[in-house]
Image: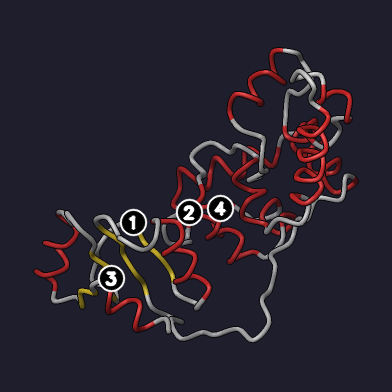
């Protein structure tokens, strides 16, 4: 859920102390629970309680990622959020609907259907809603769709952006990011030490973007 202060070490400590066992337990932590993790932990507890409360308003894709569905990482979570808009819609999606989505496919689709068919998942979703956790995609005002219908592939290391930051920019402008180069690819954004994806894009005649050209496109 991208909660500031809730790093791997703190999570492991909470697990060891049996204060949490799944995502909903995070939202049931008390001030005293958190303060007990550190000596003189009052300031730490205040900050983490505030960060947990703030995380309730995260975008849908972060919640999907945090659910820990097999084979579903950050990229797939963004695809699902964009396609279905709400967690309930994803939970009710059929195997066929999910399998037809580019970059999801049958294995991931089966994992999603199985996850949301479990009674413990249904109970978890209900508790998340009761805790006030956002379960819908956040729509931005003044949407700029300049990359609508365009598929980007990223390769190599970028100087000014992390991979996630570049993907977020592309998606914010209505584009899609794919992990592999194909005839459907619109652009390949190539950073330093770009590898086989760049070679394949060149062989297919796909437009190659430098980071500087990409920055010009998003001005």
The reply to whether dot 4 and dot 3 touch (C-beta < 8 Å) is no
User: Of the residues under marks 4 and 1, which one precedes in the sequence?
Assistant: 4
Q: Would you name the residue on which mark 1 appears? A: 179
Q: Can you give x and y, in whole percent of width and height, for residue 189 in the image?
A: 27, 68
Camera-near label (4 vs 3) is 3
Q: Can you give x and y, in whole percent of width and height, for residue 143 in the image?
A: 60, 83
Q: Can you give x and y, in whole percent of width and height, for residue 173 in the image?
A: 50, 78
Give the spatial CA distance, label 2 vs label 1: 9 Å
Give the spatial CA distance, label 4 vs label 1: 14 Å
Q: Residue at x 70, y 39 (%)?
A: 117
Q: Residues within 10 Å of mark 4 (few under 14, many from 20)?
A: many
Q: Quadrant of residue 97?
A: bottom right
Give the spatial CA distance, label 4 vs label 3: 25 Å
Instruction: Indicate whether 185 appears above or below 90.
Output: below
Mark 4: secondary structure: helix
Q: Would you name the residue on which mark 3 appears? A: 211
User: Of the residues under marks 2 and 3, which one precedes in the sequence?
Assistant: 2
The reply to whether dot 2 and dot 4 touch (C-beta < 8 Å) is yes
Q: Quadrant of residue 6?
A: top right
Q: Residue at x 62, y 44 (%)?
A: 113
Left or right: 62, with 73 as reference point: right
Viewer-closest of 65 and 204? 65
The reply to whether dot 3 and dot 1 touch (C-beta < 8 Å) is no
Q: Would you name the residue on which mark 4 appears? A: 77
Q: Would you name the residue on which mark 2 appears? A: 75
């Amino acid at each position: 859920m991208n909660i500031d202060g809730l790093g791997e070490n703190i999570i492991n400590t909470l697990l060891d102390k049996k204060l949490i066992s799944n995502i909903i337990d995070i939202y049931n932590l008390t001030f005293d629970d958190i303060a007990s993790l550190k000596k003189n932990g009052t300031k730490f507890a205040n900050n983490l309680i505030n960060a947990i409360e703030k995380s309730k308003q995260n975008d849908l894709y972060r919640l999907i990622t945090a659910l820990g569905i097999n084979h579903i990482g950050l990229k797939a979570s963004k695809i699902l959020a964009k396609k279905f808009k709400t967690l309930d819609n994803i939970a009710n999606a059929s195997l066929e609907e999910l399998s037809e989505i580019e970059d999801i496919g049958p294995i991931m689709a089966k994992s999603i259907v199985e996850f949301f068919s479990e009674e413990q998942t249904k109970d978890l979703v209900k508790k998340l809603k009761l805790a006030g956790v956002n379960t819908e995609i956040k729509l931005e005002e003044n949407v700029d769709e300049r990359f609508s219908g365009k598929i980007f592939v990223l390769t190599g290391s970028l100087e000014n952006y992390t991979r996630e930051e570049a993907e977020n920019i592309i998606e914010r402008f209505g584009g899609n990011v794919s992990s592999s180069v194909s005839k459907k690819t619109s652009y390949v954004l190539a950073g330093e030490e770009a590898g086989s994806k760049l070679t394949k894009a060149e062989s297919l005649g796909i437009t190659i973007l430098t980071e500087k050209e990409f920055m010009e496109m998003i001005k």
